Image (cartoon, rainbow, N blue to C red):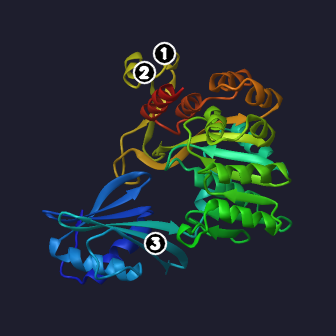
Amino acid sequence: MEEIRNVSADRALGKMIQQAVQDGASDVHIEPGREGVRVRFRKDGLLYSRFHLPLSMAPGLSVRAKVLGRMNVGESRIPQDGSYTETIRDVAYDFRISILPSMYGETIVIRILSGHVAFIENNELGMLPEQKELFHRALKKKQGMILTTGPTGSGKTSTLYAALKLLNQEDVSIISIEDPVEYRLPGVTQIQVNEKAGMTFAEGLRSLVRQDPDIVMIGEIRDKETADIAIHAALTGHLVLSTLHTNGAASAPLRLMDMGIPPYLLSASLSLVMAQRLVRKICPYCKKEMVLTEEMARQQELPISCVGKTVYEAAGCSHCQESGLLGRTGVFEMLAIGKEERELIHHHFSVDRLREAMKRKGRRTMGETALVMMEQGWISPASAGQLLAGEASWI
């Protein structure tokens, strides 16, 4: 952890942001405490300490952050939010700043959103070959709805952006409505939600369908009004892509039914539902083969059928900062909506029946996908075990 002393708050904050961009961090946490100001970066979902500053610098850092984010510099009693844009090494970055009063000063969190989207190319999402085939097949359709589901931070937006990059051709019109616009995509008309000004997801969606789009991306379906408009668009000649907060693919129709969407509309409009999680990858520079023992399988809550198989672990090296993990990958499960699935959703819906239909067609659950990725050396036995345990809790 590097000490920063004897510099202005402006220079200190600039150094932090430059370093965060260089490190590939997604967030900067500036946290004043009794022993000084701790600065942590979030990368690949995990926080780690990066800088330490004297507590006396905390007020200056807050003022500088407020100036950059166009906030009220004289107000320190209530939370504030702001944003600004800066170009660093020829790449435009959007910085979203959140300031929260705390015991020893104001805590500052800066989210870094890059205009550079090369890291979310379609072939880097982490899909297995058969999953990628289902994904591409759904994207080739002229209408219908593709949903990606999972908790916050599971990579849903990255999957949608990868889809838009694949679909972004001269002969199609693509419009997105997002909150916020995280990455800029040339050739795509991107609209940002602004609820204070009355630009909600539903209001923006209602307007954009009158703009003659071929493809519509909705950052998130949050309510019945948005769901109604999205489904109507999917049934009237538009390809609609969106996200939903559910654990598994088979539970997405239930979530929409709970919003008040009739089953017959869901069965007619849904094309593909993908559930996903982000998992840290084993470092390719220091990973080594090993045979999974019965004791290891028991410790990691892996099926006994995995015992004796070749898996991979990493001891740590300079490339992965001695963690044994480097980068993240998506782990997916796919529910392709065919004749059988439409019948189940329309007349005989249950999550269990949909999951059984997935298995009959050889579609892997998320846990089963994790086991394949473990054997291929992408993720560790511990990560696979965690996904299996998580899946068991929401089936």
Q: Is residue 9 above or below residue 373?
A: below
Q: Residue 331: which quarter of the image?
A: top right
Task: Point out the tag, 2 or 1, that comes first from the N-terminus.
Answer: 2
| Residue 191 image point, x, y percent | 65, 69
Q: Amino acid at mark 2?
A: Ala
Write the residue at 80% across / 69% down. Answer: 211
Query: Label 2, on which residue?
Result: 297
Query: For numbered disc 3, what is the local secondary structure?
Result: strand
Query: Label 1, on which residue?
Result: 304
Q: Which quadrant holds the N terminus?
A: bottom left
Q: Are marks 2 and 1 in contact (CB under 8 Å)?
A: yes
| Residue 161 image point, x, y percent | 65, 58
Locate residue 306 relative to residue 251 in the image: left or right.
left
Task: Give the crowd class for mark 3: few <14, some 14-19, many >=20 residues within 10 Å.
Answer: many
Q: Nearer the viewer, residue 313 or 131?
A: 131
Q: Residue 126: which quarter of the image?
A: top right
Locate residue 267 relative to residue 4 in the image: left or right.
right
Q: Nearer the viewer, residue 207 or 364?
A: 207
Query: Label 3, on which residue?
Result: 95
